[in-house]
Amino acid sequence: MPQKKSPFEEILLRLEEANRHLGLPDHIYNRLRHPRRALTVSVPVKMDDGSVSFFTGYRVQYNTARGPAKGGIRYHPEVNLDEVTALAALMTWKTAIVDIPFGGAKGGVACDTKKMSKAEIERLTRRYTYEIGHLIGPESDIPAPDMYTDEQVMAWIMDTYSMMKGYSVPGVVTGKPVAIGGSLGRNRATSEGLVVVLVEAVRELGLRMEDLRVSIIGVGKAGAAAAEILSGLGAKIVGVADSKGAAYNPKGLNVKKLLEHKEESGTVRGFKGAEEMTVDELLGRDSDVLIPAALEGQINEKNAGSIKAKIIAEAANNPTTCEADEILNEKGVFFIPDVLANAGGVVVSYFEWVQDLQRYFWDENEINRRLHGIMTKAFKEVYGVHREKKLNMRTAAMVVGVGRVAEAVSLRGLYP
């Protein structure tokens, strides 16, 4: 039985596939296979009972040839260096695909915030910020929220970093509260961007939004907002899943009531008027669009063969394994890959950073107008490579992103 590939090994395979079409010089290709720097830190935290616990934290800057490193911070028990490196690489290609002047980074702490108090999470955040403080900054590396981190965590990071500097530095993080320099439109940016590219794909494929049946795996911020936006555009949300199970109704689910049920009960299971099932069972039910918005590797070789959807739009990072990719490509599924589909979040993070540096803020209409323009342009560029070179959309996106990073690396050269 073949050994399961690590997240970073999967990323390297996709880089290798892109390079088959780019033909990069060896010295450029090999630089893109290695992160610029990776930091592992010990994070001692005084717990509420007076004891001291030690957590392990990471920050990886994968490539900064196109600009400051950009990437989220996640708090999760399974965070490790390989996963963080993989996600930092994905951010490198993602920022290049949407053509914003950032490199790629990622960070995280291996911890279980469900078992920690708010005060313990604050102390963890402030100590972690201190430990990585010499790497981050508005001109060098700008963190953002990710799994189990949020606006409040970003506020603590900003405050800690500002105390270290002796003055307020709002541009050190994005995804923070509007009251301290956050941007309007940031909360729903990932979902808004995903819907923009999905609408473009639907148009190119000769489909109609009001005819689409959509299943969504994961009802966190991105999944829930995507359900609301798509429902408002006339699509029928037929299936929704979380970590505890799935709800399915081929006639469509009432999204507002379903999200209220999720808020009250903590799960989509038990929602009236829907059939209960497992996540894998939902993947095998009829739908036109599947939106994985939860964990890495959610779509794999075990369940890919049963998927009925014509379009997969990846709201999560790296939700489809390489083996599943091959199966679904053979079935003719149209992918909108994560590095394109969920890039709306980093686009509006870029807007937030620009606003912070200028100390001049835009209204939400301006932000959404700019977001729609960037996401539409990025889709058309990737789709153009897909058509011209007859590549699947994931490889086409990688060709665009990796090509731009490689050009920057080549132009800047090697120092010293």
Image (cartoon, rainbow, N blue to C red):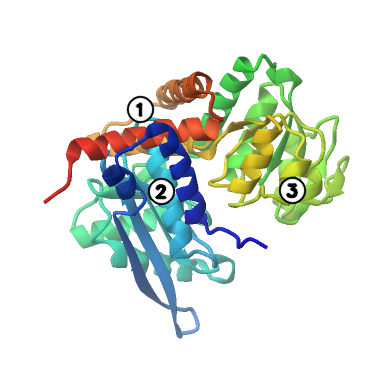
Q: Which residue is mark 2?
A: 89
Q: Earlier in the sequence, mark 2 or mark 3?
A: 2
Q: Which residue is mark 3?
A: 303
User: Is residue 355 visible to the viewer in this orientation of the structure?
Assistant: no
- The x, y position of residue 229, in whole percent, is 63, 29
- The x, y position of residue 189, in whole percent, is 49, 35
* Mark 3 crowdedness (10 Å alpha carbons): few <14, some 14-19, many ≥20: some
Q: Earlier in the sequence, mark 2 or mark 1?
A: 2
Question: Which one is in front in this view, the residue at disc 2 or the one at disc 1?
Answer: 2
Label 1 sits on what residue type?
Trp
* Mark 1 crowdedness (10 Å alpha carbons): few <14, some 14-19, many ≥20: few
Along the line of sight, the residue nearer the viewer: 174 or 380: 380
- The x, y position of residue 285, in whole percent, is 82, 38
User: Is residue 405 visible to the viewer in this orientation of the structure?
Assistant: yes
What's the CA distance linking mark 2 and mark 1?
Answer: 30 Å
Q: Secondary structure at mark 2?
A: helix
Q: Secondary structure at mark 1?
A: loop
Label 2 sits on what residue type?
Ala
Left or right: 295 in relation to 138? right
Tag of residue 37: none
Left or right: 107 in relation to 213? left
Q: Is residue 99 above or below residue 339?
A: above
Residue lying at 39% horizontally and 64% vertically, measured from the top left: 58
* Mark 2 crowdedness (10 Å alpha carbons): few <14, some 14-19, many ≥20: many
Q: Is residue 239 above or below residue 37?
A: above
Residue at the outermost bottom position: 51
Question: Which one is in front in this view, the residue at disc 1 or the one at disc 3?
Answer: 3
Q: Which residue is mark 1?
A: 362
Q: Is residue 128 above or below residue 208?
A: below
Residue lying at 48% horizontally and 40% vertically, measured from the top left: 17
What's the CA distance linking mark 2 and mark 3?
Answer: 26 Å
